Image (tube, helix red, strand yellow):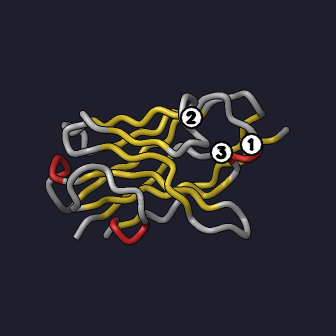
Amino acid sequence: QVQLVESGGGLVQAGGSLRLSCAASGRTFSSLTMGWFRQAPGKEREFASGISWGGGGTSYANSVKGRFIISRDNAKNTVFLQMNSLNPEDTAVYYCAASLWHGVPTRRNEYAYWGQGTQVTVSS
């Protein structure tokens, strides 16, 4: 079993930045592929970014590419999502997720463990 706890969400103005963190426990962190998904009101939960076990592989949704940066610190069992140039369309609940798959999966059903989510609101 894996427990995931997100933090770092909040209210920010358009053009601003936020850094999300996700602390993991319960399983060897370095064996997990980690991902960030987001769900806006009335929309499906969608993949935002993911990072492989060792951090050498990353993946981004087109909507966040060039603005978001995912990273991980295996010594601290934590994954981060640095979000820059935020716009109101980035407003959503952001979820941290862990996968046992190789590579960097992008589909929800490839992630077995989920955090409770953290709200990000971008005002115009």
Q: Earlier in the sequence, mark 1 or mark 3?
A: 3
What residue type is disc 1 on? Val
Q: Dividing the image into 4 quarters, which one contains the N terminus?
A: bottom left
Q: Dividing the image into 4 quarters, which one contains the C terminus?
A: top right
Task: Give me the disc on residue 122.
Answer: 1
What residue type is disc 3 on? Gly
Residue 121 vertical position relative to residue 66 in the rendered view, above or below: below
Is disc 1 placed on a helix, strand or loop?
A: strand
Residue placed most toward the observer, 21 or 85? 85
Q: Residue at x 55, y 54 (%)?
A: 94
Q: Position of residue 106 (x, y in %)?
A: 41, 56
Residue 4 vertical position relative to residue 56 in the rendered view, above or below: below
Mark 3 touches mark 2? (CB < 8 Å): no
What residue type is disc 2 on? Met
Question: Which mark is in front, 3 or 2?
Answer: 2
Task: Give me the disc on residue 10.
Answer: 3
Residues under labels 1 and 3: Cα distance? Answer: 8 Å
**On the image, numbered disc 2 is attached to which residue?**
83
Crowding near pointer 3: few (<14 within 10 Å), some, many (20+)? some
Q: Position of residue 11 (x, y in %)?
A: 71, 43
Q: Position of residue 81 (x, y in %)?
A: 47, 39
